[in-house]
Amino acid sequence: MSLLRPESQRNRSGRRLPEYRSLGCPRYGHRVTWCRQICIPIGNKGDCGRLAPHALIGRTQAAIAAYNEARITG
């Protein structure tokens, strides 16, 4: 006897994401749940208005940029 129910009897309704987690992406063309990182962000925001993860700079990246800038100017 199989441990899984047949596909026709499985409950798939609980797996949908809430509407607020999907926003329209003008570059990608439809609703996506995460950033595809294909736009050029303005500040920290992408074209869709969400925070663009590819625009954020972490501590390590900031330290490397400061080091490189100090080497060039200094």
Image: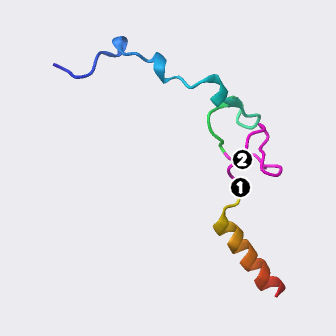
Left or right: residue 61 versus residue 47 is left
The residue pinned by badge 2 equals 52
Left or right: residue 69 versus residue 9 is right
Residue sticking out furthest to the bottom = 74
- Relative to 4, say whether 44 is above or below: below
Residue at the spot x=77%, y=50% of the render?
A: 44
- At mark 2, the secondary structure is loop
Magenta: main secondary structure equals loop
Instruction: Confirm whether the magenta stretch covers residue 43.
Output: yes
* Observer-nearest of 66 and 33: 66
Residue at the spot x=27%, y=21% of the render?
A: 4
The residue pinned by badge 1 equals 56
Give the amino acid at mark 1.
Leu
Left or right: residue 41 versus residue 31 is right
Residue 20: percent from the left, percent from the top?
Answer: 66, 27
Q: Quadrant of the N terminus?
A: top left
Give the amino acid at mark 2.
Ala
Cβ atoms at labels 1 and 2 below 8 Å apart: yes
* Observer-nearest of 69 and 6: 69
- Relative to 47, say whether 5 is above or below: above
